[in-house]
């Protein structure tokens, strides 16, 4: 059947048939699409006035007409949408009623910015939500307006190379499988979830797998800066993430106030990370661009000052590095996290006096944030009188249990800072009594 405008005001079912129209309006009736049936609208579909749509087939809405709300799929006025069928929507998804997702798949395939919205603050729970299209910049976005979105316990969120913009709303993936979220990882074309305060991207977990939180932002400079969380047990947990694409100073987290171990804090972005459910410690990885962001060595959490989180820097690709914190307790240390460079220091004295007067009796190096270390000290004849791999070990001036003679000694020190930068120091040391 082909109509420019199809209005249904009585109970109707389609069995293995195709219906095409520029716009479909279901008004105060039951509309059933059985398995195998196809409904294709070139302008939009509106389900209204206590209507019921049961979709076990396929519904496609394109924006190839001049009707108002062109390409929208809208349901309101106490209507109910149910079934396990598929939906392909080119423009907006407008839910002001009730959507029972079943095992359905909703694909938002538009090449212009698409909205998932509600005029009455109704949240939508999708089973599978698939984001596709070829639009760029703002037209890459699938944007939440006045509603939250949930993915069902068995559903999948396929972000692909799109931006799921929650604004101040939230997206929650209730499926606790680690592979319930998928996105493109092609550099510069990554798909991600963006949010502004207080919006978050939430995931539930129930294993020790690595759960990806593909967060980023196109507000200003486009940044994809994901986080990976691996819980310590198979208990039920839920974590919420947001990447804040601006200087932490703007939110009152002064980057110059630190615990004393931090040399510099990243001014480009920071993450909000909270644990909504559960108490498990996690292995926490924060990713940054090795190309655009510089080099960073650790992460820090705000508690009236920036305090260093246990961390190590790992290059995972030519494009991205990760800062890793093992067995970290997000529950006790919530919200803002920033990547930092720690103060790396190696101060070597040039004289010591092992005369047991309590002053400068040992040769001890003052260091900060050293991850690997070796020191060798030789006398003027080239004999090794002291050697150690422990940065905290001091030399008391003895060799083979005998006090060394006064004079000049030569040292060689090699190792790595926690940022993985190698160092080699060598010079002369004076031993005096």
Image (spheres, rainbow, N blue to C red):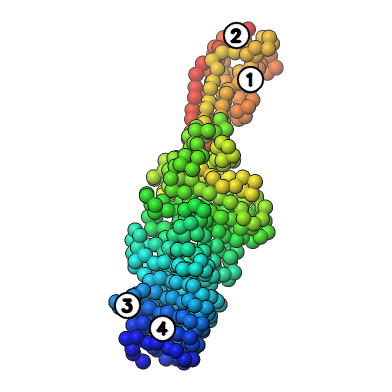
Q: Residues within 10 Å of mark 4 (few under 14, many from 20)?
A: some
Helix, strand or loop under label 2? loop
- Which type of secondary structure does the marked residue at label 4 adopt? strand
Tell me the residue that label 2 is attached to: 432
- Could you give the CA–CA distance between mark 1 and mark 4, rounded to whole angstroms? 87 Å
Spatial distance from mark 2 to mark 4, Cα to Cα? 97 Å
Mark sitting earlier along the chain (3/1): 3
Tell me the residue that label 3 is attached to: 67
Give residue 355's position: percent from left, percent from top. Answer: 67, 9
Q: Nearer the viewer, residue 5 or 259?
A: 5
Q: Secondary structure at mark 1?
A: loop
Relative to residue 131, is residue 56 depicted above or below?
below
Is there a contact, CB below 8 Å, between mark 2 and mark 1?
no
The front one of 203 and 388 is: 203
Query: Which residue corresponds to the image point at 44% horizontal and 75% vertical from the top-left?
Result: 74
Select label 3 or label 1 by which is in front.
Answer: 3
Q: Earlier in the sequence, mark 2 or mark 3?
A: 3
Q: Nearer the viewer, mark 2 or mark 3?
A: 3
Quarter of the picture containing the N terminus is bottom left
Q: Which of the image's four quarters has the C terminus?
A: top right
Q: Nearer the viewer, mark 2 or mark 4?
A: 4
Q: Residue at x 68, y 59 (%)?
A: 235
Nearer-the-camera pick, 324 or 194: 194
């Amino acid at each position: 059947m082909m109509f420019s405008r199809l209005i249904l005001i009585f109970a109707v079912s389609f069995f293995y048939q195709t219906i095409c129209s520029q716009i479909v309006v279901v008004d105060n009736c039951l509309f059933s699409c059985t398995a195998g049936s196809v409904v294709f609208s070139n302008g939009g579909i509106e389900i209204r006035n206590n209507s019921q749509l049961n979709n076990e087939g396929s519904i496609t809405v394109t924006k190839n007409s001049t009707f108002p709300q062109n390409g929208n799929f809208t349901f309101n006025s106490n209507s109910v949408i149910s079934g396990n069928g598929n939906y392909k929507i080119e423009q907006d998804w407008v839910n002001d009623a009730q959507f029972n997702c079943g095992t359905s798949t909703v694909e938002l395939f538009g090449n212009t910015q698409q909205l998932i919205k509600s005029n009455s603050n109704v949240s939508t729970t999708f089973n599978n939500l698939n984001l596709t299209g070829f639009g760029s910049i703002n037209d890459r976005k699938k944007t939440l307006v006045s509603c939250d979105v949930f993915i069902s316990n068995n559903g999948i969120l396929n972000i692909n190379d799109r931006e799921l913009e929650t604004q101040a709303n939230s997206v929650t993936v209730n499926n606790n499988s680690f592979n319930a979220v998928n996105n493109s990882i092609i550099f510069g074309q990554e798909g991600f979830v963006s949010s502004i305060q207080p919006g978050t991207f939430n995931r539930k977990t129930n294993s020790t797998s690595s759960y990806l939180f593909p967060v980023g932002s196109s507000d200003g400079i486009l940044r994809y800066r994901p986080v990976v969380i691996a819980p310590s047990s198979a208990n039920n947990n839920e974590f919420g993430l947001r990447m804040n694409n601006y200087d932490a100073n703007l939110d009152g987290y002064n980057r110059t106030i630190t615990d004393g171990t931090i040399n510099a804090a990243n001014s480009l972005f920071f993450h909000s990370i909270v644990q909504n459910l559960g108490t498990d410690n996690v292995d926490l990885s924060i990713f940054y661009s090795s190309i655009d962001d510089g080099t960073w060595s650790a992460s820090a959490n705000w508690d009236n000052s920036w305090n260093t989180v246990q961390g190590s820097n790992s290059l995972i690709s030519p494009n991205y590095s990760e800062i890793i914190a093992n067995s970290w307790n997000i529950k006790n240390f919530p919200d803002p996290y920033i990547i930092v460079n720690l103060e790396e220091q190696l101060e070597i004295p040039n004289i010591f006096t092992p005369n047991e007067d309590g002053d400068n009796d040992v040769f001890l190096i003052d260091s900060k944030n050293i991850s690997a270390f070796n020191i060798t000290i030789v006398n003027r004849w080239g004999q090794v009188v002291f050697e150690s791999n422990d940065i905290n070990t001091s030399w008391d001036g003895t060799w083979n249990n005998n006090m060394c003679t006064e004079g000049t000694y030569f040292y060689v020190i090699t190792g790595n800072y926690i940022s993985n930068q190698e160092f080699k120091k060598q010079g002369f040391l004076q031993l005096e009594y």
